Image (cartoon, helix red, strand yellow):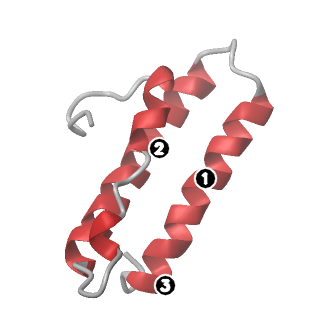
Amino acid sequence: WIRSSEAVSCQDIASCTPDLSSLQGDNPDVAEGCKAVRTSINCFRDAMDDCRNNQNIPKSQIDAMQAQMNTYDDMLSKQCDGG
């Protein structure tokens, strides 16, 4: 998805979901997977900032995004030594 040097807009939040394929299978590439999760979390943060600044977004939607991001945060702390 979008490089972190560009601001992620609220509409782009769907593209923040990390590709976790490197963490699956018999020989997971944890470093690669953790990098994807970390990048994803930064993407969620940027997108949520934009959503918050865009008054038309219902709070429930932002809460849902936050919950999704927290899932990846948990993954980071469990599988990636706290990120």
Q: Which percent across, then down, holds residue 31? A: 22, 77
In the picture, the disc for residue 45 is: 2
Q: Which percent across, then down, holds residue 69? A: 55, 54
The front one of 19 and 69 is 19
Give left or right: position of 49 versus 28: right
Disc nearer the start of the sequence (2/1): 2
* Quadrant, the N terminus: top left
Name the mark nearer the viewer: 2 or 3. Answer: 3
What residue type is disc 3 on?
Answer: Lys
Give left or right: position of 15 versus 61: left
User: Going 76% across and 23% down the picture, which residue do you hit?
Assistant: 58
What residue type is disc 2 on?
Answer: Arg
Q: Secondary structure at mark 1?
A: helix
Is residue 57 placed above or below 77 in the rendered structure?
Answer: above
* Quadrant, the C terminus: bottom left
Is residue 21 placed above or below 64 in the rendered structure?
Answer: below
User: Going 47% across and 43% down the picture, which residue do you hit?
Assistant: 44
The front one of 11 and 55 is 11
User: Going 68% across and 36% down the picture, which residue do you hit?
Assistant: 62
Q: Which residue is mark 1?
A: 68
What residue type is disc 1 on?
Answer: Gln
Q: Secondary structure at mark 3?
A: helix
In the picture, the disc for residue 78 is: 3
Disc nearer the start of the sequence (1/3): 1
Is residue 52 placed above or below 40 in the rendered structure?
Answer: above
CA neighbours of label 1 inside 10 A, class few (<14), some (14 to 19), many (20+): some
Q: Which percent across, then down, holds residue 32? A: 21, 70
Is residue 29 placed above or below 56 in the rendered structure?
Answer: below
Name the mark nearer the viewer: 2 or 1. Answer: 1
Disc nearer the start of the sequence (2/3): 2
Gap in angstroms between the C-alphas marked 2 and 1: 11 Å
